[in-house]
Amino acid sequence: MTDKTNLMIARETHMDKYEKLIYWIIFNVFISLLPLLFNYLFLSIQDSFSGLNDLFYRGELFIISAVIAADAVGEFMIGTIRNKYARLITGGSCVILLTMSSLLFAATSVNIDQINHSRVTGISVTVIIATIISSGASKFLSVST
């Protein structure tokens, strides 16, 4: 094989940053949110949907956040982000969000009847947005090896 052929093969096997980010958004984020979409559709069909609290008060977004953050922590651990400061910021924030999401889900699920549903909804939406931003940055900054 020539050097030109090897270069073409290498380009085909490595995704660029934007392509990797798009795959991550579709296959990690959107698919992980499908159960909540289905829950919304079923509640809407039954005419019993009254707001976001119906979807998020049980803490499902905390589990989804933990899974998304864990994926980004794996990216951090294998070291595919070359800039050490970017690795520390994205990896560290994902570890914090993973820990916080896991803890908040545990706290929410223990006493589901005694929690403030609106507060759980607000916090879980904030945590998933922060997780998506932090994990997305980790995916975007990572390079193919």
Image (cartoon, helix red, strand yellow):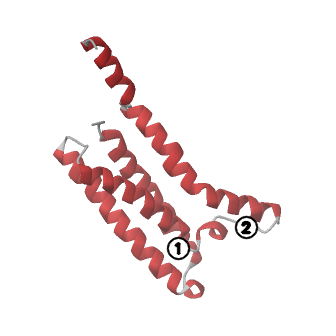
Q: Nearer the viewer, residue 3 or 11?
A: 3
Q: Nearer the viewer, residue 6 or 54?
A: 6
Q: Amino acid at mark 2?
A: Ser
The residue at the far front in this view is 1
**Placement of the N terminus among the 4 image quadrants:** top left
**Residue beneath the point at 55% across and 80% down:** 116
**Residue beneath the point at 27% across and 52% down:** 76
**Above/below status of 106 relative to 95:** below
Q: Residues within 10 Å of mark 1 (few under 14, many from 20)?
A: few
**Placement of the C terminus among the 4 image quadrants:** top left
Q: Nearer the viewer, residue 27 or 87?
A: 27
Q: Nearer the viewer, residue 119 or 89?
A: 89
Q: Residue 30, labelled with which disc?
A: none
Q: Is residue 133 left or right of residue 58?
A: left
In the figure, residue 37 lies in which quadrant? bottom right
Dot 2 corresponds to which residue?
A: 50
**Residue beneath the point at 50% across and 79% down:** 108
In the figure, residue 121 lies in which quadrant? bottom right
Do labels 2 and 1 touch, CB within 8 Å?
no
- Asked which secondary structure carries label 1, the reply is helix
Q: Is residue 102 left or right of residue 55?
A: left
**Residue beneath the point at 31% across and 65% down:** 96
- Asked which secondary structure carries label 2, the reply is loop
Dot 1 corresponds to which residue?
A: 119
Q: Position of residue 19 (x, y in %)?
A: 44, 33
Q: Amino acid at mark 1?
A: Arg
